[in-house]
Image (cartoon, rainbow, N blue to C red):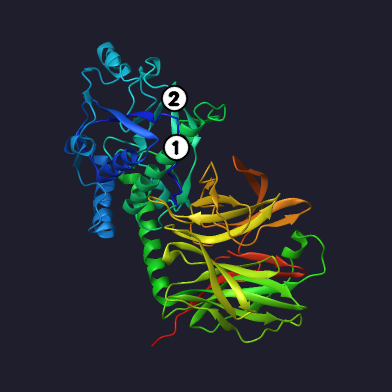
Amino acid sequence: MQPFHTEAGFRAPLKIGILLKSSNQPDWIGSLLRRLSEVNYLKIELVILTSTERKGLTAKLIYEKQYLLFFLYKLIDQAWFTRRKNRSKSLRVEDLVKEVPVLRLQSSHSDHIESNDVQQVQLFELDVILCLDKCLLNWQDCNFAQYGLYPLQDTLEWPDNDEPVGFWEVIEHQPVTDCSLRMWSGKWDTEKVIFQSFFSTHPDSVALNRSNYFSKMSAVVLQALRLLWEESNSSFWQPTVDYHYDKQVPKSPTNRKLIIPLLQHCSTIIKRKIQTRLFNHQWFLAFSFHDKSKYFGKLTGDYTEMIPPPDRLWADPFPVYLDGKYYLFFEELLFRSGKGHLSVTELQKDGTWTTPKVVLEQDCHLSYPFVFQWQESHYMIPETNQKKSIELYKCVEWPHSWKIEKILMSGVNASDTTICEIEGLWWMFVAIAVEGTQAKDELFLYYAENPVGPWEAHKRNPVVSDVRNARPAGRIFQSDGVWMRPAQDCSGLYGRAIVIMEIVRINPHEYIEKDHMKIEPLWSKNLIGTHTLNIEGSLTVIDGCRKRLKRMR
């Protein structure tokens, strides 16, 4: 099942124009053009090449020596972190879209487009123009495209772009990088945000962060254009959020402004590398029994911590209450093998538990044992993303024996599948990594009449595109009649915190949620993360992560 592609039906594909500054383009733009050409809801009708002259790199350095340190840092960062990975390899546009007309603008003025060029572009009756060059100032008056101009000039390399996207986010250790698609409103300082997405900033490298940005932007463009194609006759496609440029937009740093932040950044990288050598990130479990009736009252109080042996981690706890006993399923991973399996233990109200026993082990990594009951039987959907599938297992002997019942989806890089019956339909919430994205960034939604399927994709997938609240973090539950979805905040660090999202509206055409509360890794000492929460009756279970000194050989 493909998360993006939809059947074209009777609706004609959108006619796309691509604005570029030259024939030679970096590899990521080639990848974007390839993906645009592969989907059936888009058709590239025209490539527009500007003729505006820009100051070359050598000339820029000669006349603007104050940027020398910035330039040298970029070269070293690119060479050190990317090595053989080269996202800026030059490709010719004519070789990428061989049958598409190429229009070279004749405008001699760098700020305006000539009337003859205007007429040439208008002949193609474009729906959208993707601007991978800086838009000329009078373009808003030309009615080039029915649904507007989408500027992507943030992707330009220095010196063509004095606002280097993805640079300050790394240097200033900002947890997320904004990768939103905007539509030019016709004013030089204002744009309309039409699709917002945020991914986790790479902690060390500007080059890798920008590479992630390019890949993510390609996915965002495809997602937004698919939604535009599906909603083009609907009042839904009305951007309402203004993005205003101001004088505080970070620019390329001068030598004086960069030297101190750069030294601090290098120091942080060295410190992190040392800690990685010395410490494991060890996940552990914790549980607490409560008499409180309110769900959120059960999130407070003292937890009994279940600390695993030094050679492994325990994470992703899922409790089940059956025949007066509390069972806890969880992921167990040995650091030496790096491969997880699923285990179970029985919890006692006096704070003790039985020796864990393995219930499911395969050649691939297993985690997130989502256990649920349906038609008087227990089922499990473990994470099996290394197999590129979502699999349903049925318990044949409680709680230790499970057999595969059905492959629900194949060909998907899916994580943390979570299902729930809401208002007569079963809903599947799952983090899926499509090309250009990571599973922790994107939440996809599917629905079916029963857990066995078939599962239908939600019209607005991905329904969440934000590393701060996309990936599932446990079972969906009700509190005072309101459905709540635990989600992971993976900004800055995988599994850093848990966010409880309130589901406002859910149906096959809409999905709306809002922040309700956040659980920071503060419920115990020295935590650096917490990423799974579940409640079963009077039992609350959660996991946490601490740094633990590695055993020296």
Name which quarter of the figure residue 410 lies in: bottom left
Is 506 drawn above or below residue 476 in the view shown? above
Q: Is mark 2 on a helix, strand or loop?
A: loop
Quickly name the residue at label 2. Answer: 147
In the displayed structure, does residue 327 sit left or right of residue 42? right
Q: Give the image location of residue 81, x and y in percent.
A: 29, 59
Is 495 drawn above or below residue 216 in the view shown? below
Q: Give the image location of residue 351, x and y in percent.
A: 72, 81
Q: Residue at x 44, y 21 (%)?
A: 187
Name which quarter of the figure residue 46 lies in: top left
Q: Which amino acid does label 2 sit on?
A: Tyr
Q: What residue type is labelled 1?
A: Arg
361 vs 247, nearest the viewer: 361
Quickly name the residue at label 1. Answer: 226
Q: Give the image location of residue 279, x and y in percent.
A: 45, 75
Q: How many marks?
A: 2
Rate crowding at label 2 as few (under 14), some (14 to 19) or many (20 or more) other CA atoms within 10 Å. some
Rate crowding at label 1 as few (under 14), some (14 to 19) or many (20 or more) other CA atoms within 10 Å. many
| Label 1 vs 2, first from the N-terminus | 2
Is 300 drawn above or below residue 45 in the view shown? below
Viewer-nearest of labels 1 and 2? 1
270 vs 553, nearest the viewer: 553
In the displayed structure, does residue 235 sit left or right of residue 106? right
